[in-house]
Amino acid sequence: MSEHRLIDSIAGSMADLAEFRKLGHESIDLVADYLGNIRSTPVFRPMTPAERDRLREQRLPAEGTAADVIIDDFAQDVLPFAMGNGHPRFFGWVNSPPAPIGILAEMLAAAQDPSCDVGDISSLYLEQAVVGWLTEIVGYDPETAMGLLVSGGSVAILTGLAVARQHCAEADGWDVRADGVAGAGGKRLLTYVTDQTHSSVRKGIELLGLGSSSVRVVPTDDMFRMDPDALARMVARDRADGHRPFCVVASAGTTNTGAIDPFDRIADVAAEHALWLHVDGAYGAVGALHPQLADAYAGLRRADSIALDPHKWLSVPVECGCVIVRDRELMRRTFSLVPPYLRTEEGKGVGGPPSFAEYGIQQTRGFRALKVWMTLRHAGRRGLTDQVVRHVALARHLAAMVAETPALELVVPPQLSVVCFRYLPSDGDRDPTRVDAINELVERRVQAEGRAFLTSTVLRDRFVLRASVLHYATTEDDLRALLHIVCTAGATAERELTRES
């Protein structure tokens, strides 16, 4: 293939700026119509086998396809089958809708397409700014803390745990970067979590070579929060047995229930036993903005590292997580490795601020900061606070309606914007296996019908329905509709199981 033909094949009609402008306007119209009409579409639309096959069995065409054809195919074959989190009646997992200005930011960032690791370029200074905003939200000192934007909570947690491991090695006099965990002299490095801790923590422990068998599960109270007294007893016993307790992971809003662990008391235990305190706040750290939740978040700033996801409660488009470490120099010692071809000096040539690659895993990094900057700046601190307050209020209202509905049972009072509840059989039969089976059918039926969407979890070995309120346009009418749909599905599930038995 000639050079000119290769360029034409890649660029296609994009080489014509007039055509590009036309396609851009059509794409914006497509997105605007999608957002404007979203309430008239199913929350979730299951795909038929033919629709799935049409996407996954495509072959790379020998010749290029016209851009307008590709956009038409997107509108027909891709757009109708979204996750559903853009719909105000989506209550599944912890997936917020994208803020409209964040959607535009994705396009503008792609137009520049920088690698945000090194250089005297705008994207790096913008990331410094937005990470500073997030640092202030969680109560850290921006002068001594360091953070960076990553793909999401999983990488943020892995990064924080890697710094924790470095801290442990320095404190005990061995070089983890040179010798790996073998330098610990055979001592097991133990991490303390609860059964509500996100699975990415265990995955991070495994990836860091510490082994999942080094994870200790601390009991929780009736609100599914970590028990600090039990933590202290476990740490003391493990230390007496010759192990090296090195890290405790607390949660600022668990995925299951929105539980907020007692940070101050956990921090006291961590300080007494020289433990690194990492807080998984991927979902709920920004709950610290809520003026009436100050007591629940007391002690958050005492954590050594925090993970939080702007792409969750802040409605920044996926992907965008953030990790913040209270000791910036320790974070740099954990990751810094600058090859000669990337060495620069600030103020000379292309030299800019210290490379973000010195503080984390990635070298090439996307321009995530632009969508954070545009979304948070558009809302302002007051707008972000209002959104958190509103969602918490809606969750409490939903919980109150559940408690007032005879066919439903509230499993645990909501602490943030997650509500866990169950459908109860009308015949009074509370056999746990049967109740679980009915609620499993309820979840599947609600999801498939597409009028609303919720998910589930397991608490104390019982299957429960779970609704997460994170959409900026969700109303109390949507909550009432959700419960009506659940109760109708529950009655149908009862009849189906009765017939089968």
Image (tube, rainbow, N blue to C red):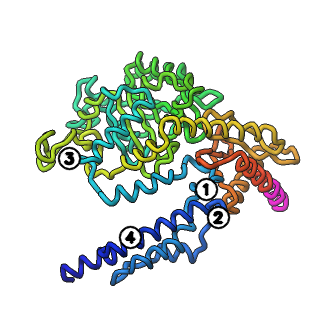
Can residue 468 be seen by looking at this rendering?
Answer: yes
Q: Which of the pair 245/257 is nearer the observer? A: 257
Instruction: Please tell me which of labels 1 and 4 falls first in the chain.
Output: 4
Please tell me which of labels 1 and 3 falls first in the chain. 1
Q: CA distance from mark 1 to mark 3?
A: 40 Å
Amino acid of disc 3:
Gly
Task: Tell me if label 2 and label 1 are in contact, CB under 8 Å.
Answer: yes
Query: Is residue 497 in the magenta section?
Result: yes
Q: Which element is circle 1 on? A: loop
The first of marks 2 and 4 along the sequence is 4
Provide the residue designation for mark 4: 21
Q: Main secondary structure of the magenta part?
A: helix
Q: Is residue 202 visible?
A: no
State left or right for residue 151 relative to residue 84: left
Q: Which residue is mark 2?
A: 41
Circle 2 sits in a helix, a strand or a loop, which is it?
loop
Q: Which mark sits nearer the N-terminus, 2 or 1?
A: 2
Give the magenta range.
491-501
Disc nearer the start of the sequence (4/3):
4
Q: Are marks 2 and 3 in contact (CB under 8 Å)?
A: no
Residue type indicated by callout 1: His
